[in-house]
Image: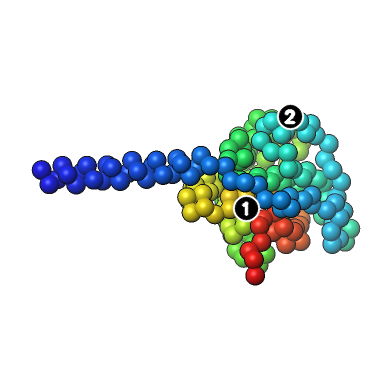
Amino acid sequence: MVFKEKKSIVFTAVVLAVLLAATYLGRRPVEQDGVVYTLPSDFGTWRGVDVSYNRDLLTSWVGTEHMAFKEYHNTGTGHRVTMYIAYYPDMGASDMTHAPEVCYPGQGWSITDNNTINHVLSGKTVRVKRMAVEKGDRWEVVYSWWQTRDRVIAENWQYRLFQVWNRLLKRDTASLWVRISAEHGTALGTISRAEEAIHAFCTDLSPLLGHYFLQESK
């Protein structure tokens, strides 16, 4: 009898927890003014131009109008990278996003390597996704990650769990999805140069990303 009562208590507690989570997750937080901005076309020794794309179509795919899609050239080193960033003001806005493992094959690319690696951003070692992709005579190295105000996350499922936790604690759930890629050839050393370009670009880019998020009052 006591065992049945304990099971009933546990079951009730689980149901209440689920209902509580559903209540919080169903509330869409009010968007804060002044936290969305466009990344500069030029910063440091990087010079950028917009990539031509169908904005309406991409918006319908990724669920946000706040995007930056540019190609950057470094006037000092000659490095070239392509940057795509999507800003989501809250957790609900990012529901339509999908993993790059889905995105690239859907656009005709083959994935030849896919893992998570250590990467340094703003002086901290974090985990990001690294992919090698190819289509016809084009080869690219691709780094991507989710970023919130206080964390960088490689995998979509980890991002979802972290944001659910943030929502339950009534924390800000704004986020960025960041993708940096660089083309390379088949000659020895070209992949290393592509990754060198990505690392150099990320070092200069990362201080700018914090402006997307609410700043804690001092």
Report x, y in % for residue 145: 62, 50
Marking on residue 57: 2
| Quadrant position of residue 1 | top left
Secondary structure state at the residue bearing disc 2: helix
The residue closer to the viewer here, 139 or 214, is 214
Query: Spatial distance from mark 1 to mark 2, Cα to Cα?
Result: 24 Å
Report x, y in % for residue 73: 85, 52
Marking on residue 18: none
Amino acid type, callout 2: Leu
Left or right of 5, for residue 55: right
Q: Is residue 78 visible?
A: no
The residue closer to the viewer here, 22 or 128, is 22
Query: Crowding at label 1, few (<14), some or many (≥20) Cα neighbours within 10 Å?
Result: many
The residue at 47%/50% (across/down) is 168
Q: Earlier in the sequence, mark 1 or mark 2?
A: 2
Report x, y in % for residue 173: 58, 50
Secondary structure state at the residue bearing disc 1: strand
Marking on residue 147: 1
Query: Crowding at label 2, few (<14), some or many (≥20) Cα neighbours within 10 Å?
Result: few
The residue at 28%/42% (across/down) is 12
| Quadrant position of residue 56 | top right
Q: Is residue 72 visible?
A: yes
For residue 10, above or below residue 215: above
Report x, y in % for residue 92: 58, 40
Amino acid type, callout 1: Gln
